Image: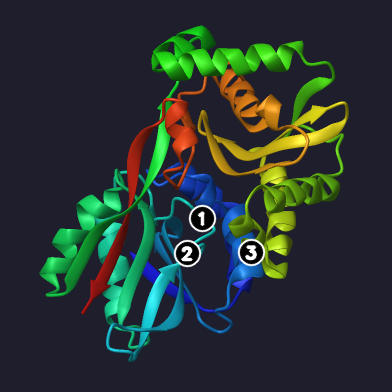
Amino acid sequence: METSLHTTPDIFAQLQPEWNALLHNSTADTPFLTYEWQKTWSDCLCSCAGELHLLTVRDGGALLGLAPLFVVSEPNKDGKPQRLLRLIGSVDASDYLDLIAVRGREREVFEALLGTLAQLDRWDAIDLWNVPEASLTRAVLPELIAARGWKLLDEQQVVCPIIRLPAQFDDYVQSLDKKDRHELRRKLRRAEATEGVSWYAITGQDHTHDLDEAAEAFITLLMKSRSDKSEFMTDDMRRFFHQMIHATHAGGFLHLAFLEVNGVKAATYLSFDYNQKRLVFNSGLETEGFQSLSAGIVLAARIIDEAIQLGYSEFDFLRGDEEYKYRFGAKDTWIYHLKVER
């Protein structure tokens, strides 16, 4: 087993032919750990110039593990600077993050990674955010950490509400609480009776739309929908959204949906279709002129229906406990924060 530390961005291009193949052969396989996502986030949002700490684990030349880390300095509870190793994508812009290890050899890979990290003096804590509750990292790491005499914090971070999808949309609607079922059907009937209402989605297989124009339309509706989303959309974040939409489209898992009324965009959902699941990353809404239509609810129902027709197993709302997610019948799963100190 050979573990190597890489600190320059050219490692992304070197690993591109192997990155997603390893990810697909791991239990950590999510869109936020793909080459497309990690490279785009690093290019647009990483304030870690010179602090990239990407580790690879190989056996006989074959790539078995990846730890896409970088160092960030933040004050601890006493106000003293602390050097933290975080996963690329942390913390706010990526919902599921993890260490990547080939399926069946996680313990070997994690032990090799920890052995290399133990020899480095450039960090005070390994600070892993957004780790899914079912991650093998949470199952394997405690024993390895304890054997080194290090400390491990494993705490619940935030919920990710998920709908387990049935075979038919009618079965899904019937599974909702009586009040929520009645309201959803009423809103769908109203939309069907309203002239000029239509929806469409730009996917990884769609090459007929201008992606930059679609990205700007999405960002406009996102910023209109809530003041905190408007504040979130900095210049760097706008650049990230543009490049990320291009990258996920090239990766084949983009699903960018719009609901229009007589050609005017009223609602939008940016999702990823990945491993027979639809994951909703963010949304936007025109708050003036379409209130009676409930455009956001109607579009969400349409993309849930489509996901069911495609045979998907889950509709994942990702992070946040907004009330509307539960009116759609979503149930909580959790992501966790793991912190290792030596």
Q: Which mark is residue 231?
A: 3
Residue 301 vertical placement versus 279 (above, below): above
Circle 2 crowding by C-alpha within 10 Å: few under 14, some 14–19, many from 20 = many
**Residue 267's spot in the image, x, y percent?**
71, 36
Q: Residue at x 85, y 20 (%)?
A: 196
Task: Quadrant for the C terminus, please.
Answer: bottom left
Q: How many marks?
A: 3
- The amino acid type of the residue labelled 2 equals Ser
What residue do we see at 44% from left, 76% from top? 5
Q: In what element is the residue under mark 3?
A: helix
Q: Earlier in the sequence, mark 3 or mark 2?
A: 2
The one of 47 and 297 positioned closer to us in this rendering: 297
Q: Is residue 287 left or right of residue 110?
A: right
* Residue linked to disc 2: 90
In this rendered view, identify the residue nearer to me: 132 or 194.
194
User: Which one is closest to the eye, mark 3 or mark 2?
Assistant: 3
The reply to whether dot 1 and dot 2 touch (C-beta < 8 Å) is yes
Which residue does the numbered mark 1 point to in the structure image? 94
First along the sequence among labels 3 and 1: 1
